[in-house]
Image (spheres, rainbow, N blue to C red):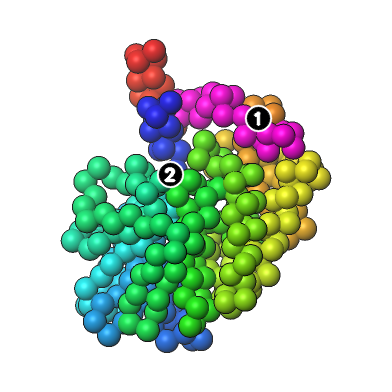
C-alpha cells in the first residue's frame, strides 16, 4: 500500500511558477503573502529571525522572494505534506523544518533539521507566537497555526470555500468534520483566516461553514456533481458555503456510513491515473506484483 501511494504522488503536477504576487498584509506588521494563483506561502518577520509557512512548489522560487524582503535566519513550518506546500523546501537547506509527525513521511528523503510538532506547541518569531492546532482530515498531519495577538489563523488547505480536496487515502471526511468542530473553539481568537488556495483572508465564520457543510455531506444531504479535474474524473459536493472534491462516484461508495472513503476502490483509480501520467509507474507496479 505504501508503495502504491508513493507511485501516485506524481499526480500533483508542478503547476507552480515564479511567484507572481508578493503582498504585505496591511493589517498585520511584518506579515507577507506569496501567491502564484495555484498555491500560497506566508512570511512573518521578527527582529532576529523570520518564519516561512509552507514553501509552495519548487518552481515557485519562494525562497528567492523571501530573500528580497529579509536576510534574517529562517525557520519553516509546513501546514501539511502535500507537494504544493513542501515543493520549495530544498532551497531552505539549513533551516529548521517544523511538521506534524503524521506527515513526516511525505518529506523528501534529503530533508534535514526536521522538528516534529504536536497540538498545543508554540512557535515564536518576533511578536508572533503561533499555537499549533492539529486538524487531521485533509491529511493525517494537517495543522492550523494561530497567532492570538494578531488574530491570524493559517489553515493550509482545510478552511476555505473550496473545493477542499479530499482525493487520496490521507483524506477522511469524518475526521475532517471533527477537526472543524474542534477548530470552532478557536474562532473567537481568529480575525483573519489564510488558506493555501482561493480567496484570502476569510473571516472566522468560515470554520463553522466548513463544519456544517462537511456534516451535511456525511449525512448524505449534498448532491454529487461529476467533473473532470486535473487529477482525473472526480465528484464535487457543493454545500451552502463550502465545496468538497472527492473521487468519482463510480469508484467510491457514497454513503453516510463511509463518508465516501472506500480506500480499496479508490486505490484502483490512483493506479489507473498514475499509469496515464507516468507510464513507467504502471510498469513498475506490474513488476512488483
Residue 57: within the magenta? no
Above or below 284: residue 104? below
Q: Which residue lies furthest to the left in this view?
A: 94
Q: Nearer the viewer, mark 2 or mark 1?
A: 1
The image shows residue 48 at horizontal and vertical percentages of: 24, 82
Crowding around mark 2 (Cα neighbors within 10 Å: few <14, some 14 to 19, many 20+) is few
- Mark 2 → mark 1, Cα distance in angstroms: 23 Å
Residue 149 visible? The answer is: yes
Task: Identify the residue at image location x=34%, y=42%.
Answer: 105
The disc placed on residue 13 is 2
Residue 275, picture quadrant: top left
Q: Position of residue 210 (x, y in %)?
A: 67, 58
Q: Of callouts 2 and 1, which one flags the residue occurring earlier in the amino acid sequence?
A: 2
User: In which quadrant of the rendered view does residue 218 lie?
Assistant: top right
Q: Looking at the picture, does residue 15 appear above or below residue 28?
A: above
Q: Which of 26 and 276 is in front in this view?
A: 26
Q: Where is residue 253 in the image (x, y as percent from the top left)?
A: 69, 29
In magenta, the rendered stretch is 254-275
Residue at 44% across / 64% down in the picture? 120
Q: Mark 1 points at which residue?
A: 252
Amino acid at each position: 500500500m505504501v508503495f502504491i501511494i508513493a507511485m501516485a504522488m506524481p499526480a500533483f503536477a508542478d503547476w507552480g511558477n515564479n511567484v507572481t504576487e508578493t503582498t504585505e498584509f496591511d493589517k498585520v506588521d511584518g506579515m507577507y503573502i506569496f501567491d502564484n494563483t495555484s498555491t500560497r506561502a506566508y512570511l512573518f518577520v521578527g527582529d532576529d529571525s523570520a518564519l516561512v509557512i509552507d514553501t509552495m512548489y519548487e518552481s515557485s522560487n519562494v525562497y528567492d522572494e523571501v530573500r528580497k524582503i529579509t536576510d534574517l535566519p529562517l525557520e519553516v513550518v509546513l501546514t501539511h505534506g502535500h507537494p504544493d506546500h513542501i515543493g520549495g523546501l530544498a532551497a531552505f537547506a539549513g533551516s529548521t523544518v517544523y511538521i506534524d509527525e503524521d506527515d513526516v513521511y511525505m518529506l523528501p528523503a534529503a530533508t534535514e533539521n526536521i522538528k516534529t510538532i504536536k497540538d498545543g506547541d508554540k512557535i515564536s518569531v518576533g511578536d508572533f507566537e503561533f499555537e499549533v492546532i492539529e486538524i487531521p482530515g485533509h491529511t493525517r498531519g494537517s495543522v492550523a497555526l494561530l497567532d492570538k495577538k494578531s488574530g491570524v489563523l493559517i489553515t493550509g488547505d482545510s478552511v476555505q470555500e473550496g473545493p477542499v480536496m479530499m482525493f487520496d487515502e490521507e483524506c477522511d471526511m469524518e475526521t475532517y468534520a471533527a477537526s472543524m468542530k474542534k477548530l470552532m473553539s478557536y474562532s473567537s481568537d481568529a480575525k483573519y483566516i489564510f488558506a493555501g488556495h482561493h480567496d484570502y483572508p476569510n473571516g472566522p465564520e468560515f470554520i463553522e461553514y466548513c463544519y456544517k457543510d462537511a456534516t451535511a455531506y456525511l449525512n448524505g444531504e449534498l448532491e454529487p456533481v461529476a467533473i473532470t479535474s486535473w487529477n482525473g474524473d472526480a465528484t464535487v459536493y457543493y454545500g451552502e458555503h463550502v465545496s468538497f472534491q472527492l473521487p468519482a462516484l463510480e469508484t467510491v461508495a457514497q454513503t453516510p456510513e463511509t463518508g465516501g472513503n472506500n480506500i480499496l476502490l479508490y486505490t484502483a483509480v490512483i493506479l489507473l491515473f498514475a499509469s496515464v501520467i507516468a507510464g513507467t509507474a504502471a510498469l513498475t507496479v506490474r513488476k512488483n506484483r
